[in-house]
Amino acid sequence: MDAGKRVGWFALAVVGALGSGSCYDFRLTGPEDAPGASPPRLVSVTIEYRQPNQCDNSQGRCGDSVIFFGSWMKQGEEFALKGDPGGFIWRGVATGVPVNFPPRDQPHYVRVFDPHILDFPTGGVTAERLRIGGQILTMFDSSGTPRESGLIFVDENGIGHSPF
């Protein structure tokens, strides 16, 4: 064997020896289980509702409070908004509202029960004239029915965003 071939074989042997000592391990390191889903961040959101000036109620319940409902709320968590003295504006703050903006899935569904419109086809339920986190609702589901709801996304600052 000539000297050139010996050097080539020697170099190949050295590379082989070095490579065999650090064999690539195809096993990945890390947790055995997938990380748990983190719960959504919760914020407080201002609610504002403008009640119609005239009470259309044959049952004499015009003095009853306006009640707010949100799709994230469990039954019994709905709450009464506070009316401005001498006015037709009702306000409140919803706490524990899951952040869902930028849109990750479905918007929140929101509505109020207003005794001023109890004799309307919606039975007093409406999402019209409702402002969530400063955003006037523009998208509705089941409009004109007792299931009427407005659709809204809420960001980490408690600001409402209309669905696109």
Image: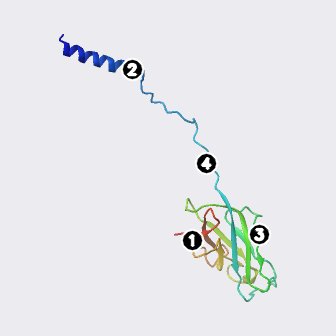
Kind of residue indicated by mark 2: Ser
Which is closer to the viewer, label 4 or label 2?
2
Point out the residue furthest to the bottom here: 54
Q: Regarding mark 2 in the picture, which secondary structure is present there? A: helix
Q: CA distance from mark 3 to mark 1?
A: 23 Å
Q: Give the residue number, with chain letter if any, for mark 2.
A: 20
**N-term mark: 1 or 2:** 2
Residue 11 appearing in the image = yes
Number of on-image labels = 4
Residue under pointer 1: 162
Are dots 1 and 4 in contact, CB under 8 Å?
no
Q: Residue drawn 62% across and 68% down? A: 159
Q: Around disc 1, counting alpha carbons within 10 Å, would you say few (fewer than 14), some (14 to 19), or many (20 or more)?
A: some
Residue lying farthest top? 1
- 110 vs 7, left or right, is right
**Counting residues from the N terminus, which is met first, the one under dot 1 or under dot 4?**
4
Q: Amino acid at mark 3?
A: Phe
Q: Which residue is mark 3?
A: 79
Residue at 69% x, 76% y is: 48
- Above or below: residue 56 compared with residue 155: below
Checking the image for residue 37, the label placed there is: 4
Q: Secondary structure at mark 3?
A: strand
Is residue 118 in sight in this rendering?
no
Q: Earlier in the sequence, mark 3 or mark 4?
A: 4
Q: Is residue 118 above or below residue 102?
A: below
Label 1 to label 2: alpha-carbon separation? 61 Å
Marks 3 and 4, how far apart in space?
A: 30 Å
Q: Which residue lies at the image location 42% right of the left edge and 24% below the top edge? A: 23
Q: Position of residue 134 (x, y in %)?
A: 64, 74
Sequence-first disc among 4 and 2 = 2
The quadrant where residue 122 appears: bottom right
